[in-house]
Image: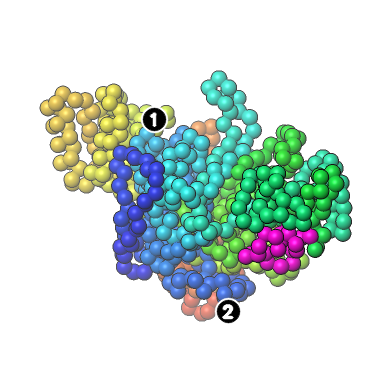
Amino acid sequence: MAENKRVEIRPAKGRPMLSWVGKKPLRDVIAYPAQLVETFAPEHALKTDKNLWKDWTEKFPKSGLLFHGDNKDVLAHLLANGFRGKVKLIYIDPPFDSGADYTRKVSLRGNKRSVTLEGESYTLGEQIQYSDIWANDNYLQFLYERFLLLRELLHEQGSIYVHLDPSRSHYVKVILDEIFGETFFRNEIIWRNNNAHNSADKQFGPIHQNILFYSKGEKFTLHPGRRPFSKAYIEDRFIYQDMRGKYQTNYLTGPGLRAGESGQEWRGFNPSNAGRHWAIPSAIRELLEVDTKGMRTLEILDLLYEQELIIFPEKEGGQPMYKQYMTDGVLYQDLWAYQPNTKGVLYGVEEDIDEDVKWIEKYPEMYNYPTIKPEGLVERIIKSSSDTGEIVLDCFIGSGTTLATAQKLGRRWIGADINKGAIQTTAKRLQGIIQEQLESAKSKSKPLPGMKEDETPPPAQFSFAVYRVNDYDLQVQHNEALNLAVEHLGITRTKTDSYFDGTLGKKLVKIVPFNHPITPLDMEEVKRELGNRPQEERDVVVVGYGKELAVQAWLEDWNRNRKRTGLPNQIEAKDLRVDAKSGGFFVHKPAEANIKFKRAGDKVNIEIETFLSPTIIERLKSQAGLLSPQIDDWRAMVDSVMIDSAYDGKVFNITLADVPEKKNDLVEVKYVVEAKKGAAIAVKITDMLGEEVLVVKEV
């Protein structure tokens, strides 16, 4: 995995086709190498079923895989390294709300009063994934390329679910029709996720989101599941009872004439005479003790009759009816609704029963992502379109709900995100789940987390590995640098503009992420945005940290042509690295820690004496409404502590993890680990904003 590889991608041939400015096919991609940076494999982990991993590539450990990087690079890497056609289920929740604030909110630990900080905003490639770019067509191309890659990874009998906003789903559906084929569109699931909105002056209240469901081929997994009948419906309809329980009678036929056995006479009744055909529901087939696949319709009817699952009630004119038992419930349809304030009955079901797909109300603040989805919603999708041990993929993991749910449901999983905070949050969440599963598996006294008593699939893995693809580590905290640029250059922020960050006098300002210099590509983006605003006459200042030499030639050519033709929008580039006014304000002060190590035989005592995060201190000072904040305990700034008792300088193998479950809990100060003499002990401290400090000591 040390060399770049070029991976060929098959073209999309479906219809209809959506056009946009800049649309181009993805014929091939470069697969960059992945660097293993961290593993979580508890020493007391149990072994899992080896048969699950027969289709797994030897290039990766038999564990969960978590990738940090642009998901286009990650998907290309997976294709180049053995995962083509291996993924059974893809669920993705790409950013879609053009007006949303996708900044993660974090709180300090142990504070009696709530002290909330804004996490890092998104930078570099994250701008495309998480910013308001629907004003141009970049996002459509962005999704188009990733859908092509996802199709290549998907198993021939696999499925993909794409979670979207109603205002964008129609665009994406046409793209998916082109890539997967219109005939393989299965459902547009409507998820009612909210209560009423007071927006009648502008629109009907938006209370739902859309989930587009496609299969890759004609054959695919689908276990839709059932929800219980309402009490009122049971009392009204389930008036019969036998040894199997309470039941009601229901039709064995469906409307419309059919050729073949579906329209033939059976035991004196011919469905064709009533304009109907035999339609045997799957729920009643499941009660038979034999596999009915490949069996003739009349044979199945005979078996059902022999096992007293079919009766001929007089009130139905002697028409054969099947026994529908109370335990069957109602199959889930394409409307997934949760209405906490109603008791209405829909199709014999109380609507407020559907609690597993309700909006987030119970999740810990540590997962406080603005777009987090409930585990119950993802659980329904995973159970419906995959089986135990199969591979589930999510390349927009956010807070890690898909991976967490897959881990609980005994599936193998692969996840990716370009945001480092998402990787850290997900890794921490998975560590907690795996530890709980290990304890449950050992005690065998209770089901696994999130499982019912009769549903305990064993975990597919008790470990995971974290990789970095194409190195997206930030050298400068973007929020910190951006705030300093705004303050010291006198920029007025404009939150209502979807592209420009503010104004400097009468000029528009675009701030380029500070982890790379201003490039001609950045200038082309500004040019493209101005092209979308023909009435805009203001000049533009592009602010960045460093500037490539080619930028100056680009600017001279642009400004000369604008002046010659009498057009507005002169552009200048301000390099803060050489700007005298910025001075030393852009010196990033990393977090630091003092740690004491002391050997005692084959064990090492570790004590964290102090920890300081200058970024958190500065952020607290700059946020409105907080006056001279005081942090009495340095542990309030610490999110987690990880220890590797035999660090090799390359991969951090977690042998001890201190991840407080509740927001008011603090990390420990002292730790004890077993380690060989002369071993390098590494302690990784992560602050509440995701910045890491690594202290290594040979003891």
The spot of residue 199 in percent (x, y) is 57, 24
Q: Which mark is residue 462?
A: none
Residue 481 in view here: no
Q: Splitting the image into 4 quarters, where does residue 152 fall? A: bottom left
Residue range of the region highlighted in magenta in the rendering: 284-305
The spot of residue 599 in percent (x, y) is 55, 75
The spot of residue 219 in percent (x, y) is 53, 59
Q: Is residue 82 left or right of residue 611?
A: left
Tell me: residue 491, above or below residue 676: above
Residue on which disc 1 sits: 497
Q: Is residue 129 left or right of residue 365?
A: left
Q: Splitting the image into 4 quarters, where does residue 492 fall? A: top left
Tell me: residue 509, above or below residue 18: above
Instruction: Check disc 2: other Cα within 10 Å, few if <14, some if 14-19, many if 20+.
Output: few
Task: Confirm whether the magenta stretch covers residue 486.
Answer: no
Dot placed on the residue nearer the N-terminal end, 1 or 2 = 1
Residue on which disc 2 sits: 602
Q: Label 1 to label 2, Cα distance in Å? A: 60 Å
Camera-side residue: 171 or 632?
Answer: 171
Name the residue rendered at 43%, 72% in the picture: 59
Circle 2: residue type: Asp
Camera-side residue: 47 or 670?
Answer: 47
Name the residue rendered at 17%, 34% in the picture: 558
User: Which quadrant of the figure contains the N terminus?
Assistant: bottom left
